[in-house]
Amino acid sequence: MVYGCYSMKNTVILSPYEVVYVTTLVTGFIVLLLIAIYYALRSRRIRNTSVYLSGEPESVVSLITPSIASLYWGFIKKFAKSLYKVLVERVHTGSLHDWYKFLSSWFSLLLIIAIIAFILTSLIG
Amino acid sequence: MEISTLIFSITIFPGLLFMVSLAFLTQYLVRKLSARYQRRMGPSYVGPFGLLQPLFDFLKLLRVKEIVKTKYSMIRAAEFSLILGIAFIISSTILLPLSPYNVAGEFDILVFFYMTSIMPIFMLIIAALTTPNPYTNIGVSRLLSVLTIAEPAYFASLVVPVYLATRGKTPFMSISNTYIYVPNLWLQASTLVIMLLSTLAYIISVQVKAMFPPFNIPEAEQEIIAGFETEFSGPILALARLLHDLDLTIALIVGVYVLLGGPAPFRHFSVNGAIVLIIKYTILLLAVVTVKNIMGRYRIEQALTQIFKYGLIPALLSSIFALVIYH
């Protein structure tokens, strides 16, 4: 049952692709219109200043945006806690011995995989 | 239909002029209702009952205030991305049955979602990052964190009613077709629970998208200055505010059509239908403003947990129920 009485006479039914084309064209038209209105009305006054850092000098932040390394470690710390724990508690302990143990275990694994691959390719040809 | 109808639809009603006016009215209502909740007067002096205060604020930022830029700012990129975000929202109105030149097609809800939910937020983030600042970066990262959970909830809260309403009908998954059948979904016991869950997920996700308390952590004032808006000023701040208001306005309009059935039980383009549309829009806005004013700000991890609990889980449950019952 359709509740009430409706008509769709003001509706143009198109294919999904045509809907995308029409909406994209309309968006382009609106962008041009808005740019014309905005640049006709906007204030032309521009003041140059330093970055707002609550009164602190710019030197308190070494980089204006976070470095790639900071983003990477931030992500690992937040979303891969167990991996971060292993890396901090077993690898980056400050002891060269721990670092060597971690790396040698991985290198041993890689070496074993390389030997197996070599044997298999020799046997199979 | 004629090209003049299309031009009228995208420039006057319900396009540019109507949407911008409605966005200002929505901002006025949010400020006025919030003020009354807090025993303040709210906007009172500009125009009758202070109605023109948002327009006055916008024009003052646009025409009088200066753009404050740093050596890292990319002003043109910020302006263009904000204008593009606004244009996406305004042009999406031709997909609504409200438009005298209404374009519909199968799966047009996906196009609508892309234009009104993904692109505006994406453009706002780009604009924020073109005016870099440590506070801006924190605000953007918080915004991305909350939206990662809220956007799927918003998407599901709209797609599920559209799917249920347009099953077996042409065009399938179309907003224009949905509102006609939505009242039936509220009247059937099997779909009533689904609609209630979708409405709950919708209210929570709109609260997040509008960055209203308790989910205003991306622009947490005092704590991170103004978050992603810290380096916005003058005309750029005017555009950012307008984009924010339009984002809320279009979310409420689509909620009225997809969740509450648009002008039902009356016809479209009738006086009764228009009154019902205004009442439903006001009810949704009142719900959002009430939540805004009775809750305090969550910390980021609290916000993520609450959005997950009360936004994403109801949205997932409604999706599962809809698939189990009707697939």
Image: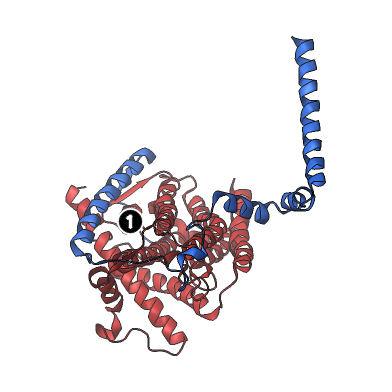
Furthest residue in direction top, as rendered: A125
Residue B261: x and y in percent read 43, 62
| Residue bearing the label numbered 1 | B93
- Whether residue A89 is visible here, answered yes or no, is yes
Residue B175: x and y in percent read 41, 53
User: Which image quadrant: the C terminus of chain A?
Assistant: top right
Disc 1 residue type (three-letter): Thr
- Quarter of the image for residue B285 reads bottom left
Taking the spot 23% from the left edge, 67% from the top edge, the residue there is A45
- In the figure, is residue B108 to the left or right of B158? left
- Which chain letter matches label 1? B
Q: Residues within 10 Å of mark 1 (few under 14, many from 20)?
A: many
Q: Which one is nearer the viewer's eye here, B61 or B176?
A: B61
| Visual hue assigned to chain A | blue
Label tally? 1
- In the figure, is residue B212 to the left or right of A103? left
| Chain shown in red | B
- Quarter of the image for residue A41 reads bottom left
- Whether residue B264 is visible here, answered yes or no, is no
